[in-house]
Amino acid sequence: MKKLFAALVVLVLALGFTIPSLAGPVKPTKQDILVMKHDLLNLWHMGIGNAEEMDRNHALFSSLRFILRGELGDSVEYRADYPDRFTNLPKKYDLFVSSANAKQVAFRVFNAFLEEELPHGVFLGAEGYYICTSEFNAGTEIAGDSYLPSYCSIEGMMQQADGTLLLSGKVRAFKQNFDTGEEILWASAPFMARFSPADGGWHLVSFIFTEEAMG
Amino acid sequence: MKRCTRTMLLFAGLMLACVPCVFAAPESAASPAVAVEQTVPSETMTGAERAALNGEVGVPSPDLSLGDVDEEFSPPPPRDQRITLAERLTLQNAVCVLWANGMKQEPASVESLDLMNADAPDHVFIDPPSGFFYDNGEWVFEGLIRQMAPDSTGIEQIGGIQSFRVSFKKEASGSFSVISIYFGDLGKG
């Protein structure tokens, strides 16, 4: 009887380990897809054409630049809105990005960890990064065209057996034709991208825009 | 013997009861539910302060503006009321769904809550949002919504464009209550 009980326990444990793999890979939610589209569009606007062009040795600089380009309202605190955050800091620091947000973007988009060396115009406080935008942006201004109305459409989506997600689609930007008043296609680029599931979301593993990126 | 068999059956039963949970479709981070309470068109528009601050960090306004905004300063949201990127994108998606489903009149009325959780058509988009701010306890999100539509020769262009303004509250549960939605004409679309 004891043997039968032991065999049953082993069987149940084996089943317990097997069932999750039978359940299949983690599927992206609608929110996950929206964030993926946002990230790809933002990278295109930053002029990064493929994963090899990403500067992973300066992930902090890249992540803060990414946040300032595309997540101002969501991830940034302004000195004017939250003066208590900036107490005893020189007035030149006008924005705050939490360490958690910067880390999340570094991992989610750049597949990297934040380095210790601080970019020019950035001060590290107890809870995050204080940015002097004029110093931080000096020499790295993003082209005005990168703020044109634009969107990312997904035309193909395929999940691999290892759980990674392959996306293909196109990014487009429109500009007003001052002769006709119509907004016409100004730039576009087909893309391929691969995302991998991770704790708390998905992260970008590789991507390529097959036409010259803007920015 | 009988006791042992009973224990085994109980154990096996418990494991079997867990199977449906494991096989259930994995759904991480459920989308925030969006509930619509009422529709009240509003004329109040603030956000000039924020637009100016945006200008400081090199974010130009879109080519087409919504019009006048008043100069009144709106206090910032409490930190627990702030909206995350995923939440903002979900709201953008919801506005696109409503607009794409024919809600282009002024003032708009919400017909179906299901629309809020649907997928927006691929070629309807909001970018860049021209206003996203906290005003008197409500979040306000405003800007231009566009639809790309190729012309008769296949050239991709913007075939429809309207302004929009949505105000909503973030509930303690993390869901949103929409207070008003407004779509306005720009003379085409």
Image: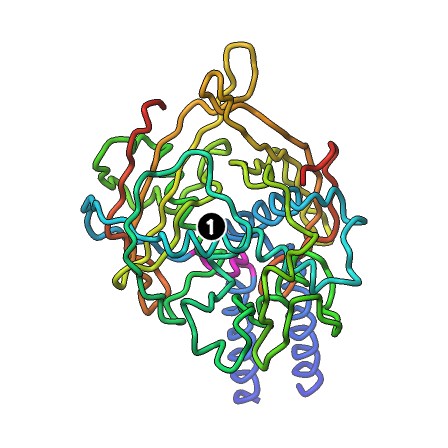
- Mark 1 crowd level (few <14, some 14–19, many ≥20, 10 Å Cα): many
In the image: residue A98, left or right of residue A51: left
Q: Secondary structure at mark 1?
A: helix
As drawn, B152 above or below A113:
above
Asked whether, in this view, residue A79 is left or right of residue A206, the answer is left
Check if residue A91 falls in the magenta segment: no
Q: Please name the residue shown 39% across and 29% down the image.
A: B161
Determine the image quadrant of residue A115: bottom right
How far across and how far down the image is residue A151, in percent? 54, 37
Q: Chain of mark 1?
A: B
Tag 1 residue: B89
Q: Main secondary structure of the magenta part?
A: loop
Residue A135, how many percent across, how many down?
64, 62
Closer-to-camera residue (A50/A2) = A50
In front of the other: A173 or B54? B54
Residue stretch in magenta: B23-31
Residue type, label 1? Leu
Q: Judge by depth and name the residue closer to the eye, A80 or A96.
A: A80
Query: Where is the C terminus of chain B found, in terms of image quarters?
Result: top left
Residue located 50% across and 34% down the image? B122
Q: Where is residue A199 drawn, in percent x and y?
A: 62, 66
